[in-house]
Image (tube, rainbow, N blue to C red):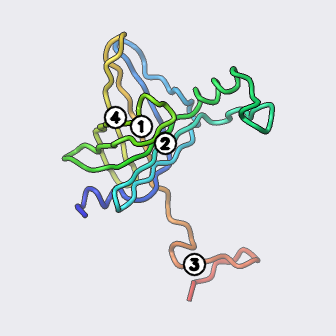
Amino acid sequence: MSGARSQRCGRWRAGQREVAGQGRIASLPFGAGAVGLLLYTADGWMSATIMAEGRRPFSRANPRSASAVERAAAFDGYFSYAGRWSVEGSRVRHEVTVALNPAMVGTLQVREARLVGRRLTLSAEEATEDGLRRHRLVWKRPLRRAAQRGTTRSKAGRRSTAR
């Protein structure tokens, strides 16, 4: 596995997603507290999902029984796709096989990728009726948990080294 590819493997948490169009200030479509997860596997699969913080639950337990307005709000506050991934120079390529938005299935999503420390910034441009729109997502690699570093917590909350 190439160095650029292996550096991206693992899980990433959403930091911030910005969208800016010509002559417009960048917006945060999922709000300042967006929650998300990006996964890259060593065998070439990826999954990206992001949602608005504080999404309202449906009024009924079964989502099929929720109103069309509730379902539309849930769709607007959530974004997800998955598929194969590869690195090409400074770009990461996502070959979409499943997605919340059916129009994305079968598409190739190319992102400029910049990795600095524990931050991965993915950027793309999109042609729209209103002109060029720029997307920028900042993902953060979480710090490893104590159990992953070889330590555990006892029931009393004290750290001990795993043997």
| Mark nearer the N terminus (1 vs 2) | 2
Q: Quadrant of residue 34?
A: top right
Which disc, if any, is residue 137? 1
Give the alpha-carbon distance from disc 1 to disc 2, as whole Å.
Answer: 7 Å
Q: Secondary structure at mark 2?
A: strand
- Disc 2: which residue: 15
- Disc 3: which residue: 151
| Mark nearer the N terminus (4 vs 3) | 4
> The residue under label 2 is which amino acid type?
Gly
Give the alpha-carbon distance from disc 2 to disc 3, as whole Å.
Answer: 27 Å
Q: Nearer the viewer, mark 4 or mark 1?
A: 4
Q: Secondary structure at mark 3?
A: strand
Q: Are marks 2 and 4 in contact (CB under 8 Å)?
A: no
Q: Nearer the viewer, mark 4 or mark 3?
A: 4
Q: Secondary structure at mark 4?
A: loop
Q: Could you say which is closer to the camera, residue 64 or residue 161?
A: 64
Give the alpha-carbon distance from disc 4 to disc 1, as whole Å.
Answer: 19 Å
Q: Quadrant of residue 96?
A: top left
- The residue located at (59%, 37%) in the rendering is 33
- Disc 4: which residue: 107
Above or below: residue 89 compared with residue 127? below
Q: Nearer the viewer, mark 2 or mark 4?
A: 4
Above or below: residue 105 compared with residue 125? below
Q: Are marks 2 and 3 in contact (CB under 8 Å)?
A: no
Q: Nearer the viewer, mark 3 or mark 1?
A: 1
Question: Circle 4: is it few (<14), some (14-19), or many (20+) Cα within 10 Å?
Answer: few
